[in-house]
Amino acid sequence: MKRPTEKCLINPSRDDLLQKVDNKYLLSVLVTKRARQLFDNDEPLIDENYINKVSMAINEIDQGKVSISRTDGGVKSE
């Protein structure tokens, strides 16, 4: 069982990301769409190098570089 004082091993944590996106379902859609863009050779928006495109997408969201548009379901990049 996880103690309350322990740090989460996933960085950024889901709770941190949910402060930037309304709910976990939208977060899932945003991560998926941005990771797909990265797999399709879209330019990364952060300087950090990640082997995993999903990790890169998550960190772009955490840094506020990517958001989701509710009107058309698109992913907006800074």
Image: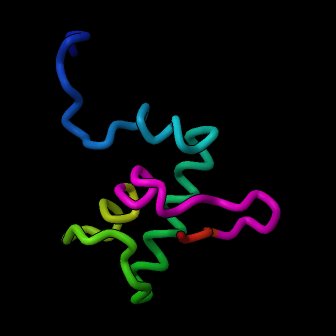
Q: Going by the image, does 55 lie left or right of 1?
A: right
Coordinates of residue 60 in the picture (x, y in percent): 40, 61
Observer-nearest residue: 77 or 37? 77
Whether 52 is drawn above or below 4: the answer is below
User: In the rendered image, which quarter contains the N terminus?
Assistant: top left
Residue 65 is covered by the magenta coloring: yes
| Residue 10 relative to residue 69: left or right | left
Which range of residues does the magenta coloring cover?
Answer: 59-74
Rendering coords of residue 57 (x, y %): 40, 63
Above/below status of 62 relative to 41: above
At 53% from the left and 52% from the top, the residue drawn is: 28
The picture quadrant where one finds residue 12 is: top left
> Which percent across, then down, holds residue 78?
53, 69
Identify the residue at image location x=40%, y=54%: 63
Q: Is residue 69 left or right of residue 48?
A: right
- Give the percent coordinates (x, y) of residue 24: 56, 40
* Residue at (82, 62) in percent of width and height: 71
Query: Residue lying furthest right in this view?
Result: 71
User: Residue sitting at 51 percent across and 37 percent down?
Assistant: 18
In magenta stretch: residue 77: no
Give the total of numbered labels: 0
What colouring style does the render use?
Answer: rainbow
